[in-house]
Amino acid sequence: MDLVTIAIVLGLLAVVYGFVTSRQVLGAAAGSARMQEIAAAVQEGAQAYLKRQYTTIAIVGVIVAILVAVFLGMVSAIGFVIGAILSGVAGFIGMNISVRANVRTAAAAQTGLQEGLTLAFRAGAITGMLVAGLALLAIAGFYGYLTMLAGYTVGGDDRTVVDALVALAFGASLISIFARLGGGIFTKAADVGADLVGKVEAGIPEDDPRNPAVIADNVGDNVGDCAGMAADLFETYVVTVGATMVLTALLLSGVPQLAGLMALPLLIGGSCIVTSIIGTYFVRLGKSQSIMGAMYKGFLVTAILSIPAIYIVTQLALGDMNAPIQAGDPGLVANVDPGMPLSEEGTASQVGGFTGMDLFWCSMLGLAITGLIIWITEYYTGTNFRPVRSIAKSSETGHGTNVIQGLAISMEATALPTLVIVAGIIIAYQLAGLIGIAYGATAMLALAGMVVALDAYGPVTDNAGGIAEMADMDASVREKTDALDAVGNTTKAVTKGYAIGSAGLAALVLFAAYTTDLAHFFPDLDVDFSLENPYVIVGLLLGALLPYLFGSMGMTAVGRAAGDVVKDVREQFAADSGIMAGTSKPDYARTVDLVTKAAIKEMIVPSLLPVLAPIVVYFVITLIAGPQNGFAALGALLLGVIVGGLFVALSMTAGGGAWDNAKKYIEDGNHGGKGSEAHKAAVTGDTVGDPYKDTAGPAVNPMIKITNIVALLLLAALAAG
Amino acid sequence: MDLVTIAIVLGLLAVVYGFVTSRQVLGAAAGSARMQEIAAAVQEGAQAYLKRQYTTIAIVGVIVAILVAVFLGMVSAIGFVIGAILSGVAGFIGMNISVRANVRTAAAAQTGLQEGLTLAFRAGAITGMLVAGLALLAIAGFYGYLTMLAGYTVGGDDRTVVDALVALAFGASLISIFARLGGGIFTKAADVGADLVGKVEAGIPEDDPRNPAVIADNVGDNVGDCAGMAADLFETYVVTVGATMVLTALLLSGVPQLAGLMALPLLIGGSCIVTSIIGTYFVRLGKSQSIMGAMYKGFLVTAILSIPAIYIVTQLALGDMNAPIQAGDPGLVANVDPGMPLSEEGTASQVGGFTGMDLFWCSMLGLAITGLIIWITEYYTGTNFRPVRSIAKSSETGHGTNVIQGLAISMEATALPTLVIVAGIIIAYQLAGLIGIAYGATAMLALAGMVVALDAYGPVTDNAGGIAEMADMDASVREKTDALDAVGNTTKAVTKGYAIGSAGLAALVLFAAYTTDLAHFFPDLDVDFSLENPYVIVGLLLGALLPYLFGSMGMTAVGRAAGDVVKDVREQFAADSGIMAGTSKPDYARTVDLVTKAAIKEMIVPSLLPVLAPIVVYFVITLIAGPQNGFAALGALLLGVIVGGLFVALSMTAGGGAWDNAKKYIEDGNHGGKGSEAHKAAVTGDTVGDPYKDTAGPAVNPMIKITNIVALLLLAALAAG
C-alpha cells in the first residue's frame, strides 16, 4: 500500500473510533427528567451558538475563499475550503457530543467515580481523535489527491502543492481565530454577565436555570475548552505537518528519499493516532483512586507506545535508517557539526547529510518536550506545589497581595518552558538542521489526539457539576463531579501550555518556510535578515507589540460583551414575570445568540490585527526603504510576534490556572476556607485570571500563526502578481 | 577654546547652578519645631539608608574595579571608578537636598501655592542639573584627559579610549542597579510594611511618627524617585553619549571632521544644560493656577531653546553644515538612500556621506520623541483621559474588574510609545544611518536635567504632605501640598516613560557598538546575525525571558522584605512601651537600616541575572556550536532583552501610574468617592500598581543596559585574553 494511503487509513481509524465511541456515550443513561430538562436547555443554547457562529464563519469564509481563488488560484481555494470545513466539523461534532455527555456523566457518577470518569473522558476523546484524525485526513487526503490523482509534482518549480498546503492551513486558521477569540470572549462574557445579573442584581443562586445567562455560561464552557481547543490544535496540527512537508519540498527537492520524506510526517501523525486510541483505554482509576493519575496513565501509555511506532514508520518511509539524506544543492540543507562556521548567506553549510535515525531522535525530542511542558505546567498550576500555595498564602493579606503574587508567578512560569523550547531548538538543529526542528514540532503535534482528549474532558465534568447542582442531585454525586472537575482545571491549563509551546515551535517552522519561500520566489532580492539591519529591529518591535495590543483588546472586550448579556436578561425578566416565579421558561437561545453576536462584534478589530499587520508593515517599509527591507521587516515581524507572544501566552495561561486553583485550595479549607477574607481575595485573583487564561492568553496562539500564514500568502500573491 | 573644554565648562555650570540653588533652598524657613522634629527623623533615616547602601556599593565596587583592572587594564578601571563615584555623588547630594526641602516646602506652602511649588521644583532641579552636569563632566573630563593630556588617540587601532568610555558606563550601571532595584524594593517594602504593622496591626493612622516604618516609607519616596531616577538617568546619559562617541570612533575613523564629531555629543549635552537651567525659571503658575501647566511651561521653554542651541553647537563642531561626512572605508558608514539595496554583510552600503544638517535633524527627532513620549504617558496616566477614567469606572463592579481593566490599559499603553520609537529609528536611519539613531538618543538624553527635575520634584511634595499631616498643620496647607503631590504622581510616571524610551534607543546604540566592536576584535570570525540562524532565535528568546524573570523576582522580593519590616517594628513596640504612649522616640535609623539590608539581600539574585546571562549564554553556545554562534546568540540576547524589556517596562510603569491616579480620581469624589466600594477596589489596583511602577518596571532599564555593557566588556576581555 502506498505510504500516503496508509496515513489516510489511519486518519479514518480515528473517525471510526469517534463514531463507535460516540454511540457508546450517547447510549448511556441520560438521568432524570429534571436533569434532561436542564441538559436540553444547554443543548438548545449550544445549537444557537453554533448556528450564529458558523453562519458568520460561512459568510467570511466564502469571501476569503474567493480572494484566495483570485490571488492564488483554484487549487489553493479548494485547500482553504477543506481546511475550514474539516476544522469546523471537528468542533461541531465535539461540542454536540460534549453537551450530551455532561448530563450522562452526572448520571453515571451516581453509580461510581470510575463510571463518571470513563464517560466524561470518552466524550473528550471523541473530540480529540476527531481533531487528530480529520486534520490528518485533510492534509494526507488533499496531498494524496494532488500528487497521485491530479498529477502535480513536488520538488520542482511547480508551487501548486506547496501553496495548496499553506492555503489548507489558512482555512483552519479562520475557524481557529473565531473559535478561540470569539469563543473566548463568549465564554467569559456569559460567565461575568450571569454573575452580575443573577447573583448580584436578582439575588438568585449562581447556578439557577431561571437565569438564561447561566445556561449561556454552561454553553460557554464547551465553547472555550471543547470547540476552541479543538480548532486551535486542528490548526496547529495542519500548520505543523503542512509546514514540515513544505520545508521538505523546498529544502530537500533533490534527495532520492523525497517521496518517503514527504509522507513521513503524515505517517508519524497516523501512528500516534493508533497509540492515542490505545492510551484512552488505560484511563482508569488505580488503587489510589487518583483521577489525575488515571489521566497520566493514559498519556504515558500513548507516549511510550509512540516510541516504537515512530521508529517503525520512519523505517517504513526511509528504508535504511542510517543512509545519509543529502540534497543536490548542498547549500540548502542545514546540518551543522558543532563548531562548524556558517556560510555567509545565513544558511548553514552542509557537511554530510543527516539520517533517518537523526529524524527519529528529533521526533523523540518532540515527545520529551511535550512531557516536560505538561509537567512544568502542572507544577505551576497544581495545588500541591509552591506556586499555587504561595498565591493562596498571599491572599491572607488581601486582594492586592493575591494579585501581585499571581502576576509574579505568571511571569516566572514562562522561564522553564522557554528553556525547554530553547534546548529543543538547539538539539534538533544539531541533529538535522531546520528539518530537525520541524520533526520535533510534528512529533509534539502527533500527540494532539490524546492531549485534546484531556482538555475536552474538562467542560463535560464542569457542566456535569452544574447539572447536578441545578437538578438538586444527591450530595455524594456532587462530590464526585467536583472531584472530576478539579482535575479538569489542571488538564485545561496543562493543555494550554502544550498548545502554546507547540505553536511556538510551529511558528519557527513557518518562519523557515517564509525565508526559503522568499529565496525561491525572489532569488535576485538580497534580503538582509541580520539584526544589524534597523528594519529587522523595527519588525521585531512591531511584532512583539501585536500580542500586547491583542491581549489588551481581548481583555476589555469581555467587559463590554458582558454588559450586553446583563441588558438582555433584564429585558427577559421584565417582559415575563413567570420566569422568576418558575412558571415559564426563559428564552435560552435568545441570550446565547445575543452573546454570540456580541462576541463576534468584539472580535472584529483584534482579529484584523494579525491579518493587516503583515500587509501594512510590508508595504510601508517597502515604500520607505525598498522591497528587500520590506521583506526583512516582515520576516522580523513574524519572529517578533513569536518572541513576544510566547511570553504573553505562557504567562497568561499559567497565571490564570494558578489563580483558579489557589481559590480552589482555599475552598478546600486552607487559610480560613470558604467565606474567609483570604477566600474573597482569592476570588478576585480568579476573576482576573479568567480573561487571562480563557480569552486573551489562548487566543495568542492562532494570532501568531495567522500572522505567519498571511505573510506566506502575501509572498505567494506578490510572486504571482 | 577647545570644544571638549567648552563642554566641561558647561558641565561645571550645572554644578554651580546646583550649589547656588541648594543655598537658596536650604536658606528657606524650615517651619515649626514639630515640623523640624519630623523632618529630622526622615533625615536620620536617609542617612542610615545612604550609609548602608553606599558601604555595600563600595565593597562591591572595589571588587569589580579590581576585576576590571585585571581583565581590561588600569585606564578602564579608573573609568569605572569615576563613573561609579560621580553617579553616587549625584544621588547622594540629591537625596540630602530632597529630605531637607520637604519640610521647607510644607513651610512655604503656608505662604502660598507658588512659593511651595518654587521650593519643591528648585529642589528637584538641583538633582536634575547634578545628574546632567556630573554625567557630562565624567565623560568630557575623562575623554579630555585621555586625549589631550595622556596622549591617547581615537580612531586608530588603540582601543584604550573606547574601552575606558565603556568602563565609565559600567561604573554608572553599578550604582544604577543598586539604586533602582535595591531602592525599588526598599521603597515598597517600607510602604507595605508600614501599612501592615501600623494601620492593620496597631490600629494607628497611616502617617504616624510613632511607627518607625512610616519614616522609612518617607525615606523610601526619596530613594525611588530621587536617588533611583538620578542614578538611572545618569547611567543612560553616560551610556548614550559614550556609545555615540564609541560608534563615531569605530565607524568614522577616517573622516576629516573626526575631532569635531567626537566632541559634538558632549556639546549637545552641554548646550541643553544651559537651556534646562533657563527653563527652570519658567516654572511658574499662570492665571489658571495649573501646576502641571507650570511644569510644561518650563519643559517647553527648554525644548524650544534647545533647537537653536543644538544648531549652534553642531555648526561650531563641524563648520560647514552641508559638507558631506564620509569615511575612508565606505562599507562601514551606514547611510542609505530609500530603496538602495543593502550589502551582503548586513552593514548598509555607503552612497555619499551624511551632513551636519542631517545630524541636526536627527537631534531634533530626539527632542520630538521626548515630547511625544511625555505626552503619551500623560494621556495614559492623567486623570483627564479615557484610560484612567476607564479603570476608575471599572472599580464600581469590584476588585477583579479594576485589576482586569488596569492590566488591559497597561498592555495597551505600550503601543504608541513603540510606534514613536519605531518611527524615530526609521527616520534617523534614513537621515544618517546608525550614527543618526545615536544622535537621536543623545538629544533625548540631553534634556535629562529638566526631566529629572520634574521627577525629583515628586518625593519632595510627597514628603511635604506627610509632614503637614504628621505636624497637624492647617487644612489649607495640606490642600496645597496635596495639589502639588497629585502633579508629582503624573510627572513621576511621565519621567519613567521617558527613561525607558531613551534606554531602548540607547540599547540599540549599544548593540551597534557590540557588532562593530565584534568586527573590530574578531575580523576573521564570520558571525551570522541573521534571523535564519537558530542560535539567533535562541538568543532572542532567552533575552526576552530576562525581563520576565527579573520582574517576577522584583515583585516577590517586596513582600519578603516587608515581612522583615513588620518584625522589626513589632520588636521595637514590644521593647519600649513608651513609643506607643508617645513618651519616647522609636529608633528610626534601625528600621531604615534593616529595610536597606533586606532590600540589598533581595536584590542579589535578580541583579546577577543581567551580569551572568550574557556570559553563560556565550560560553554554553560556544561550547555547542562554536564562537561564531556564541557571539551571534549573545548579540541576539542583547536585542531580545530590549524587545522583551521595552514592553514589560512600558506596561508596568504606565499601568502603575494609571492605577494610582484612578484611585486619586475616585478620591476626588467620582464613582462614590472615598470609602465607597469602588474606592476599595481602586485601592487594590493601586497596591498592585505599586511594585509595577516603583520596583519591577523601572529596574528593567538598568537591567537592559547592564546586559549590553557586560557583553561589550566580555568582548573586550576575550579579545585581550
Image: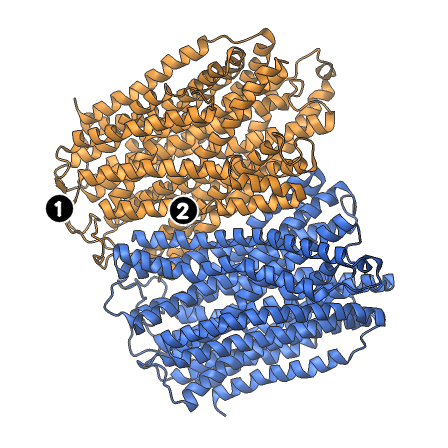
Chain colours: A blue, B orange
Chain name for mark 1? B
x and y percentages locating residue B43 in the rendered image? 53, 16
Q: Is residue B149 rendered to the left or right of residue A158?
A: left
Q: Nearer the viewer, mark 1 or mark 2?
A: 2
Q: Is residue A66 rendered to the left or right of residue B566?
A: left
Which of these two is toward me, B567 or B390?
B390
Residue occupied by mark 2: B418
Q: Residue at x 49, y 57 (%)?
A: A605
- The part of the image, by quadrant, that contains residue B656 is top right
Amino acid type, mark 2: Thr
Q: Is residue A489 visible in this depiction of the protein? A: yes
The local crowd at label 2, few if under 14, some if 14 to 19, many if 20 or more residues have their Cα within 10 Å, is many
* Residue B197 - label: none
In the depicted structure, whether residue B283 falls above or below residue A274: above
Residue occupied by mark 1: B328
- The part of the image, by quadrant, that contains residue A619 is bottom left
Q: Are marks 1 and 2 on the same chain?
A: yes
